[in-house]
Structures are given as structure tokens and as C-alpha cells.
Image (spheres, rainbow, N blue to C red):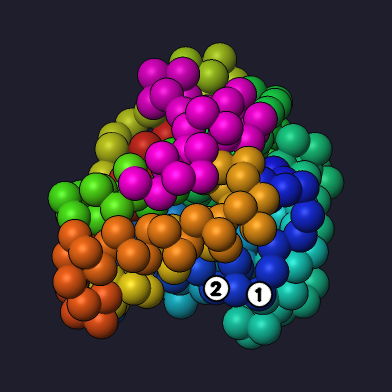
Amino acid sequence: MSGQAADDRSMTDAEIAAHDDQRDIGEAGWSSLRALYAEEFDGTVLDAGGGTGIYASALDAAGLDVVLADVDECMLAVARSRGLPAHRVLQADVTALPFADASFDGAHVAHVLHVVDEWRRAIGEVARVVRPGGTVLLALGGAHQSDPELGEISARIDEEIGGMETVTLGQARGLNSPEDADHAFALAGINRAAVRRIDGAHRRTLGQVIDRMLLNPYRSTASREVRARAAERITAWAQDRFGSLEQELDVPVGIEYRIYRRRS
């Protein structure tokens, strides 16, 4: 994923694992996602700002030729460990893609532009490298979940570590509006054709979900030390509020795509 972590350092292994875990949509969800990729894409697809390759792997499993580009070398190392060919995993900024015009049949841009200051430039770059008639799939923000208990925990964590009052500059300036996305893509020669949502779920303990939220470096500028100290207070509160943190729950997770077509 393009953009810097909250304290402007490379993400730790634990943070990367938490980053991917919150995007796990379960076996049924991944199956539906692969089917969507096979339906919407053909040929060579750029996974722009593709991070650890969690979606590039699904694109590859859908029978597509995938090229992953991301600025973070730590994440790219994880992508290579997934078995993606090394020559198709490249370090590159989504705002300055090192590819010729119309190099790809399509592009996949998921959970990245909200942490990119120059997101309009990034959209222009994606439009430039996709051929006329090609498809772009865009997912805004992070993975979505709708469980009310988890929403309460998330709000409590934001209270403790600053939350949206101290978001990264990327999140403050990045792309968060669907209407802004549609407008920017239209200006770049790409029109929205549809919106599709894939819903899934994964099973985790309450404690695992809390740890994952606290490890997320993209939700706040709070340092790792601040988050570690807050963890004790949040854990004590959660145990008092919900009981055992070892209780398991099915966490609903979804990904909503805005589907665009490049004008011929």
C-alpha cells in the first residue's frame, strides 16, 4: 500500500499480519471475489498499490496475469513470499507508475488512495496505463465491517489513541469520497459502469480483533508506544464490557468495488 505508516517507519511483521488479517473475507468471500475478477478482467492486470499481494494472489488465482506495484519494500517482500513471480512484483509509487501508456488490460486499486496525498495524480497514472476499453476496479478506504460490538470497540480505541483527530496526512488529504472518485476518473477518461459488493466473514476471538485494531498504523498518528500503553486500558475496558476476550465471533467483512471502463 502506498503511503507511510503512522509514525513514518516501515511496518513491522506484526503490523503487516494485522493489515492483511482485517481484509480476510473468508473462503466463500474469496471465492466470490475470484469470480468477480474473472468476470470483469481479462489479460494483464495492474494491482496498483497492492501491498502484500493479498488481492494480487486472488487475481492470479482467477487466471489473470498480474503485475503488483507498491512503494513499501517490506510489503513487497510478503508479496513475493506468496509465490508471485519476482519480475511481476515491483517497487513503484502509484503516483508515478513506470509503465508505458496502455500497458494493461485493466487495473485493480484497493484500499490505497485514502492514504495517498496526490490521489488525483494517482488516478491519472492508472488511467494512463490502462488501454482503451479496459476495466478499473476501485475499493475505497479499508475493509468494511458492520458488527455493532466491534464498532463500539473501534470507537473506544479511537478515543484512547486519538482516532480521526490525528489521522495521517494521507488520510486527511486522500480520497475518501465516492463522488470525488467518479469525478476524477471521468476527467481521466474513465466512466463508472457499476458498483459491486462482495460480502464475507471470518472467525476471530474478541481479543484478536482488538489486537488487530491496535496494531493498525493507518488509523492514527499515535506512536507504537502510545498504542501499547493504551492496549492495557482498552483490554481492561473490553473485559468489563463484554466478558472473556477468548469468545469467538463471526466478523462480517466486505469489499465494495466501483467498476470503471476506460473510454475507447
Real-space CA distance between mark 2 and mark 1, rounded to the nearest whole angstrom: 6 Å
Looking at the picture, tell me which residue is in the foreground, 260 or 132. 260
- Three-letter code for the amino acid on which mark 2 is drawn: Ala
- Residue topped by disc 1: 13
Which SS class for mark 1? helix
- Taking the image as shown, residue 191 lies to the left or right of residue 165, namely left
Residue 76, image x, y percentages: 72, 68
Instruction: State whether residue 203 is above or below residue 158.
Output: below
Residue displayed at 57% across by 32% down: 166
Residue displayed at 57% across by 62% down: 228
Residue displayed at 67% across by 50% down: 223
Q: Residue 199 carries which label?
A: none
- The quadrant holding residue 119 is top right
- Res 106 seen here: no
Which SS class for mark 2? helix
Q: Which segment is the magenta one?
A: 156-182
Mark 2 and 1 residues: CB-CB less than 8 Å, in contact? yes
Q: Is the magenta stretch mostly helix, strand or loop?
A: helix
- Three-letter code for the amino acid on which mark 1 is drawn: Asp
Looking at the picture, tell me which residue is in the foreground, 44 or 200. 200
Whether the magenta-drawn stretch holds residue 105 is answered as: no
Residue displayed at 34% across by 73% down: 207
Residue 92, image x, y percentages: 80, 51
Within 10 Å of the Cα at label 2, are there few (<14), some (14-19), or many (20+) other Cα atoms?
some
- Taking the image as shown, residue 92 lies to the left or right of residue 121, namely right
Residue 183, image x, y percentages: 47, 16
Looking at the picture, tell me which residue is in the foreground, 64 or 20. 20
- Residue topped by disc 2: 17
